[in-house]
Amino acid sequence: MAYRETPQPGAYCVRRADDTMLLTAAQRNAGCRWRYGVPEARHYFKDKSNYCYTTR
């Protein structure tokens, strides 16, 4: 996942340099839940950085 300004600002799934897909909030949250295995994990932006937060 990478933050990009074009074609519109947001988080993109980047497979190859020319193959990108804008991710919805639900897809970003699902990625955090998959990565950490915690149902409460959520995705947040801080400036242009991507973060996953979980509650313990």
Image (tube, rainbow, N blue to C red):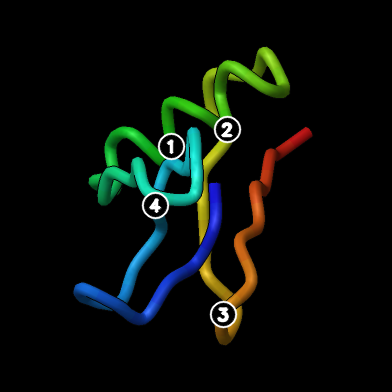
The residue drawn where x is 57% and y is 86% is 47
Q: Residue at x 21, y 75 (%)?
A: 8
Question: Who's the residue at 56% across and 23% down the image?
Answer: 33
Give the x, y percent position of residue 40: 54, 29
Figure quadrant of residue 50: bottom right
Sooner in the amino-acid sequence: mark 1 or mark 4: 4
* First in residue order: circle 1 vs circle 3: 1
Mark 2 or mark 3, whichever is nearer to me: 3
Question: Splitting the image into 4 quarters, where does residue 29 fall?
Answer: top left
Under tag 1, what secondary structure? helix
- Tell me if mark 3 has few (under 14), some (14-19) or many (20+) residues whose alpha carbon lies within 10 angstroms of its own: few
Tell me the kind of residue under disc 4: Tyr
Relative placement, left or right, of 5 versus 49 is: left
Amino acid type at circle 1 is Asn
Mark 1–mark 2 distance (CA, rounded to whole Å): 5 Å
Mark 2 Cα-neighbour bin, 10 Å: few <14, some 14–19, many ≥20: many
Q: Does label 3 or label 4 sit earlier along the sequence?
A: 4
How far across and down, in percent of the image, does residue 44 sit?
A: 52, 61
**Residue of label 4:** 12
Residue placed under numbered mark 1 in the picture: 29
Q: For mark 3, what is the residue?
A: 48
Q: Earlier in the sequence, mark 2 or mark 3?
A: 2
Viewer-side label of 4, 2? 4
**SS class of the residue under badge 2?**
helix
Left/right of residue 26 with respect to residue 5 in the rendered view: left
The residue that mark 2 highlights is 32
Q: Are marks 1 and 2 in contact (CB under 8 Å)?
A: yes
- Mark toward the viewer: 1 or 3: 3
Dot 1 and dot 4 residues touching (CB under 8 Å)? no
Q: Amino acid at mark 3?
A: Lys
Q: Nearer the viewer, residue 22 or 27?
A: 22
